[in-house]
Amino acid sequence: MCRLILAQGRFESRAVLDAAVAMSCGRTADHDGPTDVHPNGWGAVWRDAGAVNGLGVHRDVRPLSESWQESPVPDLTTDFLAIHARHATLPQNHGIQFTHPLHREDELPWYFMHNGFLPTVHSLLGMESSAFDSREYFDYVIPAGADTLDAQRTRQLLDAIPPGGSSGNAIAVNPRAAYVIHWTSPPNKSPRYFTMQRLRTPDLTVISSEVIPDLAPADQWEPLEPGTVEAFSLIPAQTQLSYL
């Protein structure tokens, strides 16, 4: 299981990174889930007008709390940042190839961060067994060649996943837009753990796996509705696309 955080608007990158570090160490854990500490690598993706495809990316197989100083993230000046701190569900799935954000270079490049375990989604891709559920989930919910994530179609795909997993909470990013998927396979045995939280102010939106008191008091956060697919524009001078 993993922890996710996304920020769009006006913010200090170091503050968002500190929030991700706090979640990765269990300092903000106030939930019913099985995991407080997430030590199996981390990654980030952010809007970078100077990058070839408009996005900057960082991955590290070390614990976030031990390696964030060696990343570019604390010093970023950006209006979009997403961070993933990982706790590998299966011991064999360790290493840079399993470190999020996962990447696929289609006509439009995609980056994908997942929190949860979906060991049955491979069957919907015609595979006999699962090799890496997050990669399979990525390929399932965002088929090759896709240039957007349609909310209604995404919810249909999610509802078709066979039972046996936990959460499909995810952040998907391409140079044009970022998407938050908030979905957990029924029955949800850890509703607080898998409920993502939103902080919204006039110039900032944060969506996080946990309430982060250092960013704002708990009463300023609100839980996302189940089945939410939320879109954010990454095109300069445009505001959030929609609440779906």
Image: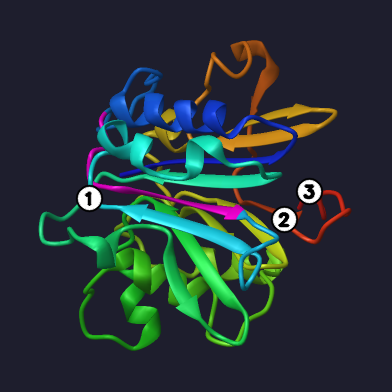
Q: In which quarter of the image is residue 203?
A: top right
Q: What numbered label is drawn on residue 243?
A: 3
Q: Is residue 31 visible?
A: yes
Q: Is residue 26 left or right of residue 234?
A: left
The front one of 160 and 111 is 111
| Range of magenta residues | 37-46
Tell which circle, 2 or 1, labels the residue nearer the N-terminal end. 1
Q: Callout 3, which amino acid?
A: Tyr
* Image position, residue 210 (x, y; %): 48, 28
Q: Is residue 24 magenta?
A: no
Examine the image and state in which quarter residue 66 appears: top left
Q: Which of marks 2 and 3 is in front?
A: 2
Q: Residue 88 carries which label?
A: 1
**What's the mark number on residue 115?**
none
Binning the other alpha carbons within 10 Å of mark 2 as few (below 14), some (14 to 19) or many (20 upward) gives many
Residue at image x 58%, y 34%? 13
Residue 195 seen in the current view: no
Vertical relation: 193 (above or below) 155: above
Q: Which numbered disc, 1 or 3, marks the residue that appears first in the sequence?
A: 1
SS for dot 3: loop
Q: Residue 51 location, x and y as percent?
A: 61, 66
> Upstream in the sequence, badge 2 or badge 3?
2
218 vs 97, left or right, is: right
Secondary element under disc 1, as helix, strand or loop, is loop
Q: Which of 134 and 167 is in front in this view?
A: 134
- Which amino acid type is marked by label 2? Ala
Q: Could you say which quadrant of the image residue 198 lies in?
A: top right
Q: Answer whether residue 42 is magenta in the image.
A: yes
